[in-house]
Amino acid sequence: MTTREQALQRLIEVVGDGARHPFYNRTTQLAALYRKLVTGDGLDDLLRQFTMRESAEAFRQRVAITQHIVTSVVANIMDVFYKIPRSNYQRILSYGAGEDQKEAVLEELIGKFWGTKTLDEWFKTRWFEMIQTDPNAFVVTEFGAFDPARGERATSYPFEVDSESAVDYRLDNNVLQHIVVRDAFKVRKANKSEATFEKYTIYLSNETLVLTEVEPSPSLPNPPEERKYYEVEGGALIRFQKRLFFLAFNTPHNAGYVPAFQVGYARDQFTGGNTFVSPFDKCVPILLKGIKSNSELDLTMALSAFPFRAEYAPACTADGCIDGHLGNGDLCPSCKGTGHQSVTSAQEKLVLTLPRRGEELIDLEKLVVFKAPPVDILKFQQEYIDELTRKAKSVVFNADIFSRQQISDTATGKNIDLTNVYDTLFPCAQGYAEKWRFQVYAVARFASIEAGLVAMLVFSKDFKLKDLTALLAELESANRSDAGPVVIRNIQADIARIVYADNPKEFKAWEVRERFNPFSGMSADKISLALSSASVPARYKVLYMMLGVIFDELEAEQEGFYMKPVADQRRIVNEKVQTYLTEAQGATRPVLGVN
């Protein structure tokens, strides 16, 4: 049985029998839970009624006044992961020497991958959003119509498939063999009634098949056998009981692999690592405890956390009022049946007639009293929620660095915390790089420019999140302590990656220039000593002093200089140095110690 025949057989099982991949329930349940925790939509569904002490009416009241904070906690946790694209990594996208045109074409295709935004921007935004709410979702690479005869290339774009729509897929040795995507759409039938029809798209290694439900009509033949293909122009018809589907055979894309990947990177141990969980999955039990506790605190604050006033009030003076009632038994319209005058605002005055005898005076301090509720329970609830919030962060990162209650105020303790944070973020960075590389190659493959492509994001194993200010301070410290050229050169490279973060070509140029800098990583004092020393060859002095001029000239004279092999670059640079060295030796006065 061919790959297509196997896929079609599985498609029949999916449509006719409702077959799903083995982890469908798990992945859809996780997606529903994560979405509630991230967006807040449907969080009230996670509240539970305590039936022994809480009536249905009291529970509804608690739900109505609850203001959830769990979304803020999750956002605070995920903000740290969003720093990964701003870390010090290398973006390599190259075809080698003489292939500048292909690189430019690929960069152009990447630049319009996500509408008006680039492929890199999609990963910096949507990838992080998807791994939060639905790590088992798929991203399929699609492309629009194009005409190769006119020199056009396929322009790829992402098609996001959530866990609920990805009804079936199969992996062999961790390689995706197929994915079936279900979609529902509304159709107005011949009798003008509206019905929901289905469409199933199955992505294979070399082609994509689409099975779309259609309305039976006299113009369409009815396959005599159920679940058997009846070939018609442009495809085939297949019947499932009273439902009729049209199978379209699209033009093969011949990619050689299924152009889709799951967005997640953290494997789900519940399924033996066959599916994925969200980056904050480890703290989900704590978040669920926080939902309940926060709801109880809101209820306590609403019902008890305010002072109340107890006071004596004079009797109602309305005509005919006797203890709040009139002679006919109706409530007194003035006091509303209370029998005393009402004081509705703390700003109102309570005026009492001065008695004639001193013993009838009332102590005003005893007339009105304000009673505050006990705050112990409120304090306990608030501290408990604060502790749950702190634990949620510390469980994800195995550190208290993002909490004011840090485990240690010592430098060692903080360094341990930061190391644990980096250990948490590094797998996410690796997943980010892996998915990015897959997507870039898919774009290049459909544009027929994948040959010779080298594309990768390189995150250092010593993964750290340092901004420009921190790196400059580190560089100053390394120079002050005479750390050595290798250490200083690495710090300078990290600084350059930040400076040229949005311009990979400029970073590439900086790397090449620094490679030919004979005094790279040396302090200013050591460079001065080297320039004045007779033991340092004159060509190194000339190269250092004329470095900027040499490379400015090479950029103008040598097209694609920075993409040439290192051996060619070295030869060309040496020729330039020799030219300046010859001019220096012919000068009437010594130049840079050259006689």
Image (cartoon, grey):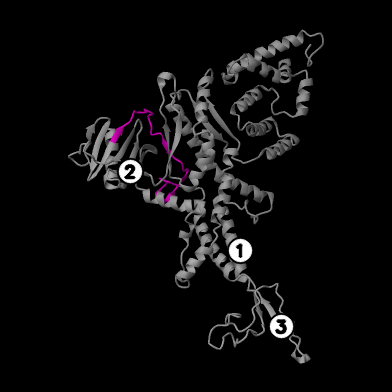
Q: Is residue 49 magenta?
A: no
Point out the stretch of residues depicted in magenta.
Answer: 247-276
The residue labelled by disc 2 is: 187
The residue labelled by disc 3 is: 366
Q: Residues within 10 Å of mark 3 (few under 14, many from 20)?
A: few
- Mark 1, secondary structure of its residue: helix
Q: Is residue 3 visible?
A: no
Is label 3 or label 1 in front?
A: 3
The residue labelled by disc 1 is: 383
Is label 3 or label 2 in front?
A: 2
Above or below residue 495? Residue 28 is below
Q: Is residue 545 left or right of residue 292?
A: right
Q: Position of residue 410 (x, y in %)?
A: 69, 52
Q: Is residue 12 left or right of residue 444?
A: left
Among all residues in the image, which is located at the extreme left? 224
| Nearest the eye: 283 or 172 | 283
Q: Amino acid at mark 2?
A: Val
Q: Position of residue 521 (x, y in %)?
A: 69, 29
Q: Magenta residues: mostly which secondary structure?
A: loop
> Is the N terminus in the top left, top right, bottom left or bottom right quadrant?
top left
Q: Quadrant of residue 89?
A: top right
Q: Cα distance, mark 3 to mark 2?
A: 76 Å
Q: Position of residue 48 (x, y in %)?
A: 46, 64
- Mark 3, secondary structure of its residue: helix
Q: Cα distance, mark 3 to mark 1?
A: 36 Å
